[in-house]
Image (tube, rainbow, N blue to C red):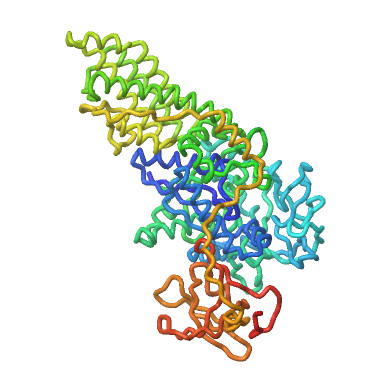
Amino acid sequence: MRYLVTSALPYANGKLHVGHVAGAYLPADIFVRFLRLNDEDVIYICGTDEHGTPVSISADNEGVTPQEVVNRYHDLIKEGFDGIGIEFDNFSGTSRADHYPLSQEFFTNLYEAGYIKPKDTKQFYCEHDRRFLPDRYVEGICPKCDAGGARGDQCDACGQVYDTTTLKEPKCKICGNTPVVTETRHWFLQLNDFTDKLSAWIEHKTYWKENVRNFMLNLLKQGLVERSITRDLNWGVPVPLPEAEGKVLYVWFDAPIGYVSSTIEWAKRMGDPDLWKKYWLDPQTKLIHFIGKDNIIFHSIIWPAMLMEQKQGFVLPHDVPANEFMNLEGQKISTSRNWAIWVDEIVKDFPPDYLRYYLAVNAPETKDADFSFGEFQLKVNGDLNNVLGNFINRVLAFSQKHFEGKIAPQTYQTESLALITDADATLNEIRGAYQNYQVKKAVKLIMDMARSGNKYFDERKPWQSIKAKDSNSTEAEETLFACLNLIHKISVALYPIMPKTVMEIRSMAGLAHDFKWKDCLQKIDSTTVIGSVNPIFRKIEDSEIETQLNKLGSKPHVLQKDYTPPKQTISYEEFAKLDLRIAQILEAQPVPKTDKLLHLKVDLGFETRELVAGIAATYQANEIIGKKVLMLINLEHRKIRGILSQGMILAAADEGILSLMQAEKEISSGSVVQ
């Protein structure tokens, strides 16, 4: 069987918090690791959603370009994933080269098939900011449930979607003023035309999570409505129609296409550009989307409809295991109030696998869950330390003390055989739990195995039977051998949840690092040589929990950074020698065989010049044409890659991200910078 697993693309406008991880990412990572233990062909694909209006809003608020916001948060999000051990085969982004033409192809196929039609609609317009307001630029009271803080097109409180103009007491999120309703033209996906196809498709999805299937069936019963898939924005994938100039594809049209473009990027990176087709175009592939419940409508209705009418014949989702939300200390997570646990920060305070374990045992699979620091401490100190850690350490320490760490294979007698037989039966249950995304059940069963190991060790009392060792008694050795086999089984079953910890356990127990699920059903077949025995887990102190609680709701953490030290002081006369002018960029193109250089042609008012600028890692050539930037024009000319560079444009550098110094107001090219 072949699997293509994805997690919802996180918005590139904020850092990763535990609510994100619990809903869509840790469950997927656990499932993928389980599949690989079973030698399944699987790839795990993700990336950042880089065209959402939250990105534009952040850019507007900060006074920077959307690309700068995207670059910054893409790296921070990936850092969070790396910190907690979420491993993707490819982690891309929707503003990359492969994504634009693919998204436009999706649109064109649906448009030519008659499933996308234009319509003049009424939309909120902010007279203060002189711009149409996409859905997320508007906030007000939900027309369905009267909840405050509702978005322009969907309420997070009740999950309902509605016509944007029905929002009560709307406010522009940029300036806070009340917008007016104005007519504009947009293009709509005719979802109702897919009702029969979607109904026939969902009919066989009896294995889907109840919350997902019921949500979809309810929407189909109510009747699907057309949905706008274009927006009046200057950041996004341009709509590929001449009459749609200035409009871009709605983020939830182009975002799921990011799963495909990320896979294409992966295939190219693997050296086989067509490899992506093996997963997306083969009907034998099981496509599985891990999401939060707020994304159900897009992945179970809109995205399948989009895929159904593509000419290449894409596979449809096999399953959409959506999880509920995770709250924090009894309240909804709020990034604006800093009522959140930032992943990149907490993994510096606690081992990442502690967090993985707690999120797994407390997974919001069928209802909303609550992250409690008190419970987090209880689970780590109780489950991991007192149950699992206690069992492993006492077995290994006893083996070191009395057998020099060498335990040879033994024959099982009645009690030992019962322990192993029950463990194997439990492993089959755990396997089924993993296959059905029931992580909480898997964790409970694994911990039950550890408890049975402690009970067996206590009842066998090897410290008593060891006294009979001189009379050739093997009872203590049998006990230890059975316990080592149980540790082996537990470690394999626990690997998808706590991969780093499992490797530490197996190293200490003298067990192989190269293992598969089938191995846990087999006896250890050679003498085990136990290494240095150290505590696997540590207890979390009350003071540590107090520190974490004090962080909640406090001023958001400011990232510390190293600044370049100031240069040597110069005189005013030396500074006056610099001739800084305003230059408008007329043309831009990449310098061949380089990744960072752009060849620019600029207008200085009194003449045009050419120069080479090292900004290609941050800016694409087409996005800087027309910009008015600061230029040092009396710099000595020099050739760079065969191009005569006649000056230098100015940019600020921040951790590898460049920001062009631009004129704030309309000003003539050639104006002197004072």
Quarter that holds the C terminus: bottom right
Q: Inspect this view and state whether residue 335 appears.
A: yes
Say whether residue 604 is left or right of residue 465: right
Foreground: 565 or 390? 565
Placement of 411 over or under 85, stated as above or below: above
Identify the residue at horizontal 49%, vertical 23% (top origin). Answer: 382
Foreground: 50 or 351? 351
Say whether residue 673 is left or right of residue 637: right
Percent position of residue 129, x then y: 76, 65
Percent position of residue 110, x then y: 57, 62
Q: Quadrant of residue 494?
A: top left
Placement of 397 over or under 245, stated as above or below: above
Identify the residue at horizontal 49%, vertical 61% (top origin). Answer: 311
Q: Quadrant of residue 434?
A: top left
Placement of 665 over or under 1, stated as above or below: below
Percent position of residue 243, x then y: 66, 73
